[in-house]
Image (tube, rainbow, N blue to C red):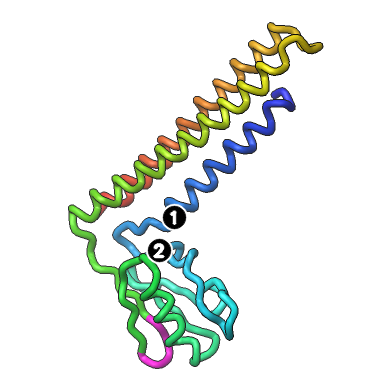
Amino acid sequence: MNERLQVYEDKMKKTIGSLESDLMTIRAGRANPNILNKIMVDYYGTPTPLQQVGNISVPEARMIVIQPWERSMIKVIEKAINMSDIGINPTNDGQVVRLVFPELTEDRRKELVKDVKKKGEQAKVAVRNIRRDGNDSLKKLKGSDISEDEIKDMETQLQKLTDQYIKEVDKSVETKSKEVMTV
């Protein structure tokens, strides 16, 4: 692979990585601690990721238990979860915070699949924009010490990369959609 194209492949890989982490936060029927990844709690005045203030476990298929390192954090954790967009009300027994995931309705599953597909489309647009940027920089090479055949070859390689990453996006979207629709 040409080192000029490596930059664009790296950007495409980052786009896929970003899509994967976005898809992890979409909840399917079972409890997945990754939906808590974006939640920050106020830890003595400092916004801190939820994972850093307690132990997160999944004792049952539809329940997440958060055991804070300090008991005083229970109310703060509950408040942070209530203010987030995960749509689950936490409960506590003075020791741990529990999140019980209700069974998803068919309509809610379809909404989530639409959301998954929308994120997939955004990733494809990002990949295509990277290809466009690459093609623009290759066009600027015309008239330099690189032959037009070499430029054409690089454009072809860039298109192959784009096709490969678009397929990866489709595969990720399909996998997540199946996961969401599985009861």
Residue 178, picture quadrant? top left
| Residue that badge 2 annotates | 32
Residue depicted at 46% across the width and 84% down the height: 76
Per the rendered image, the range of residues in magenta is: 93-97
Horizontally, is 72 left or right of 91 in the view? right
Residue 131, image x and y in percent? Answer: 56, 27
- Secondary structure type for disc 1: helix
> Callout 1: 10 Å neighbours few (<14), some, many (20+)?
some
Numbered tag placed on residue 134 in the rendering: none
Residue depicted at 47% across the width and 39% down the height: 123
| Residue occupying the far right of the picture | 145
Residue 100, image x and y in percent? Answer: 30, 74
What amino acid type is highlighted by mark number 2? Asn
Above or below, 94 relative to 165: below
Residue 36, image x and y in percent? Answer: 45, 67
Residue depicted at 39% across the width and 69% down the height: 84
Magenta stretch contains residue 119: no
Residue 181, image x and y in percent? Answer: 26, 49
Above or below, 16 relative to 98: above
The quadrant the C terminus occupies is: bottom left
Above or below, 117 relative to 150: below
Horizontally, is 62 left or right of 150 in the view? left
| Residue that badge 1 annotates | 24
Viewer-side label of 1, 2: 1
Above or below, 154 relative to 118: above
